[in-house]
Amino acid sequence: MTRVVLVDDQAVVRAGFTVILESEGFEVVGEAANGTDAVRVARRERPDVVCMDVRMPGGDGITATRALAGPGVVDPVPVLVVSTFDLDDYVFGALEAGASGFLLKDAEPDVLVDAVRRVASGEGLVDQTLTRRVIDEFARRRSPAAPDEVASGLLTSREHDILALLCRGQSNAEIAATLYLEASTVKSHLSRIMTKTGMRDRVQLVVWAYEHGIAAPSR
């Protein structure tokens, strides 16, 4: 059973999410109303996913995400940021802080359920309405002038091809169709890439690719 911690300063939002998730077989093992408490509860409960709001009094969600899943965290907890706001700085801040996904609160219940499942399984995601914009803008902000040769050398030619398509926002099925592969083969390649790079999900793998100049922003 997937274990979830809910973090939002509005009790009614936490209650609504609890009903949605528990009706689909998830177990809500903790709640928090601010980022400071979120870190404490998540470290105590070690959930499979933390659903984290961004703007909260008493400790914001970005800072809490960095404490739970950011660079250098030895045993990170996967974080799905769920926010009312789709402002670029919140999305980029969440990604840079180590979030495995970003979803808008007005998403349909089945989208929330799917998002939690995907983050728990190590896939990660960004809301479909934001994906292309986020990837392009994040790339422009973060890509260095030249590729990191050491990082690039970790990957085979085929792995470079697959990672490039992932960074364009393509799904496993779309990558498979483009490269004339089976979707299961693409999934296996991505698993190996994540092992080589030390990334825990697809979202952070895209972040890694742009930060090391392996992927380039679209023109």
Image (cartoon, rainbow, N blue to C red):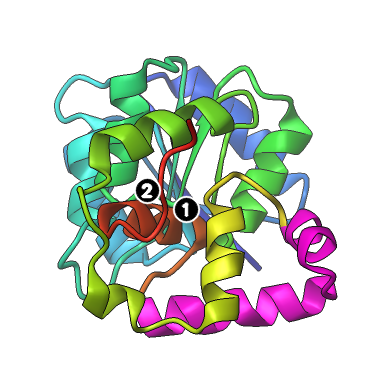
Residue 89: x, y in percent? Answer: 28, 22
Q: Residue at x 52, y 51 (%)?
A: 167
Q: Who is closer to the viewer here, 49 or 132?
A: 132
Q: Which contiguous range is marked in magenta?
A: 172-197
Dot 2 surroundings within 10 Å: few (below 14), some, or many (20 or more)? many
Whether residue 189 appears in magenta in the rendering, the answer is: yes
Q: Residue at x 26, y 21 (%)?
A: 56
Q: Disc 1 marks which residue?
A: 203
Which element carries disc 1, helix, strand or loop? helix
Q: Is residue 21 above or below residue 129?
A: below
Residue 108: x, y in percent? Answer: 73, 25
Label of residue 97 in the image: none
Task: Give the overall secondary structure of the magenta segment.
Answer: helix
Q: Disc 2 marks which residue?
A: 99
Left-right relation of 197 to 191 = left
Q: Who is closer to the viewer here, 96 or 161?
A: 161
